[in-house]
Image: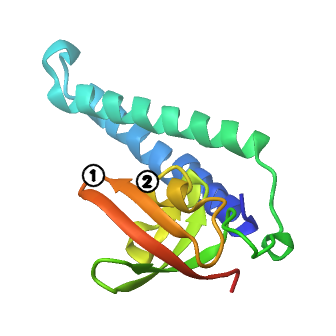
Amino acid sequence: MSREGIEKLKRELKRLKFEERPKIVAEIKRARELGDLSENAEYHAAKETQTHIEMKLADLEFKLARVHPVDVDDIPTDKVYLFAKVKVKDQKTGEEMLYTVVPPDEVDVYNNIISVKSPIGAALLGKAVGDAVEVKAPAGIINYEILEISRD
């Protein structure tokens, strides 16, 4: 992962531990005070949320214990590798798009930062400038030409 991606995971871990977890513990305590737990919807909803938070915390801690930072500046630009910014041209519409290919934990689809495991990311991986790429997307087949690969 990139150093920025690792920092993002650390911020999320901190937020869950020190903001979300205490909130849900307080909600559970408040719901318990309402009485009969067997018919207490607030209690059951809070417990379900607590389970979700604890699973997310465990997942983040697992990832952070095993992740290694990648120096993006050391990645070549002769082909599409992780963290490459790839300018492509849709062969059908002529529209140009710029994608950044990243590990799944660093995805931001609103900014065209796509997972290496997504249909587009997987199709681009290992390709070079000038290559034609066929993407089998949920909306159908898209044909791109790679125009440029960079890190900037």
Q: Counting residues from the N terminus, which is met first, the one under dot 2 or under dot 1?
A: 2
Q: Can residue 33 be seen in this view?
A: no
Disc 2: which residue: 119
Q: Quadrant of residue 135?
A: bottom left
Q: Where is residue 150 in the image (x, y as percent from the top left)?
A: 68, 82
Amino acid at circle 1: Pro
Residue at horizontal 34%, vertical 64%? 142
Amino acid at circle 2: Pro
Disc 1: which residue: 138
Q: Is residue 16 visible?
A: yes
State whether residue 61 is above or below residue 121.
Answer: above
Q: Where is residue 56 in the image (x, y as percent from the top left)?
A: 51, 39
Q: In which quarter of the image is the C terminus?
A: bottom right
Who is closer to the viewer here, 18 or 79?
A: 79
Who is closer to the viewer here, 144 or 151?
A: 144
State whether residue 36 is above or below residue 149.
Answer: above
Q: In which quarter of the image is the N terminus?
A: bottom right
Q: In which quarter of the image is residue 100?
A: bottom right
Between the C-alphas of marks 2 and 1, the distance is 8 Å
Tags 2 and 1 in contact by the CB under 8 Å rule?
Answer: yes
Callout 1: SS: loop
State whether residue 152 is above or below residue 78.
Answer: below
Position of 60 with respect to 28 (left or right) is right
Question: Given the current orientation, which residue lies at the most extreme left position?
Answer: 39
Callout 2: SS: helix
Question: Given the current orientation, which residue lies at the most extreme right position?
Answer: 74
